[in-house]
Image (tube, rainbow, N blue to C red):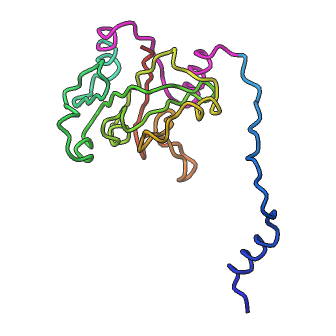
Amino acid sequence: MISTKEYILNAIRKNKPDGSKFAYPKIPLFPKSNKDILQEFKDNLTLNAGTWHIVKSIKDGENLIRELYPQAKIICSSAVEFKGNKDITQITEPHQLADVDLGIIRAQFGVSENGMVWITEKDMDITSLGFLSQHLIILLDPQELVKDMYEAYARIDLLNNNYGCFMLGPSATADIGAVMVRGAQGARSLSVFFM
């Protein structure tokens, strides 16, 4: 009696093309949106419960942080533009970021078709900053936008990063009773500062 595994492998061997090499299928070019790339990003970020702000200077950003997050006692930043009161260079263990009220990270680029940003472990310094912080500010250069995920995947550098992720809006789940809960598995709010 032949095992199920052997049955499947035999079927693959029997139907495998003989000795020829076949090229990978071509990825088609899909039509792109006609919308302004920055406006499309803003619209899609807003649809996913994120907020955005045009920030003209570091001083304006500092004022906006105080206005938006007046209750934030512990602020940790991996971005050079803003210094928090918890120094990320002194963190030796990821759980030491569990008390962070506000995390600030610079993203490498954004994707306009869905309002997501791409960040890596190098951008966060310590990956848990992006997931243990109660609230997140993502700094994004408005010139660093791509139209869609095809352009995004062509841009990410997987070989030179141990970890990277696309982040979209605050954490959200509606698994229990179809009730939307924000912040269940990550940040309760996400705001993009264009600067």
Residue at point 45% right, 15% down?
Answer: 194
From the top left corner, tell me how far across and down residue 180 is, in percent: 53, 42
In the figure, is residue 42 to the left or right of 108?
right
From the top left corner, tell me how far across and down residue 22 is, in percent: 77, 52
Vertical placement of 88 versus 195: above or below?
Answer: below
Q: Nearer the viewer, residue 12 or 180?
A: 12
From the top left corner, tell me how far across and down residue 85 is, in percent: 19, 27
Q: Quadrant of the C terminus?
A: top left
Q: Quadrant of the N terminus?
A: bottom right
In the figure, is residue 103 to the left or right of 139?
left
Q: Where, by quadrant of the figure, is residue 56 drawn?
A: top left
Q: Nearer the viewer, residue 120 or 10?
A: 10
From the top left corner, tell me how far across and down residue 130 is, in percent: 37, 37
Furthest toward the front, the residue is 19
In the figure, is residue 85 to the left or right of 10?
left
Q: Where, by quadrant of the figure, is residue 83 drawn?
A: top left
The span shown in magenta is: 35-62
Q: Where, by quadrant of the figure, is residue 69 drawn?
A: top left
Furthest toward the bottom, the residue is 1
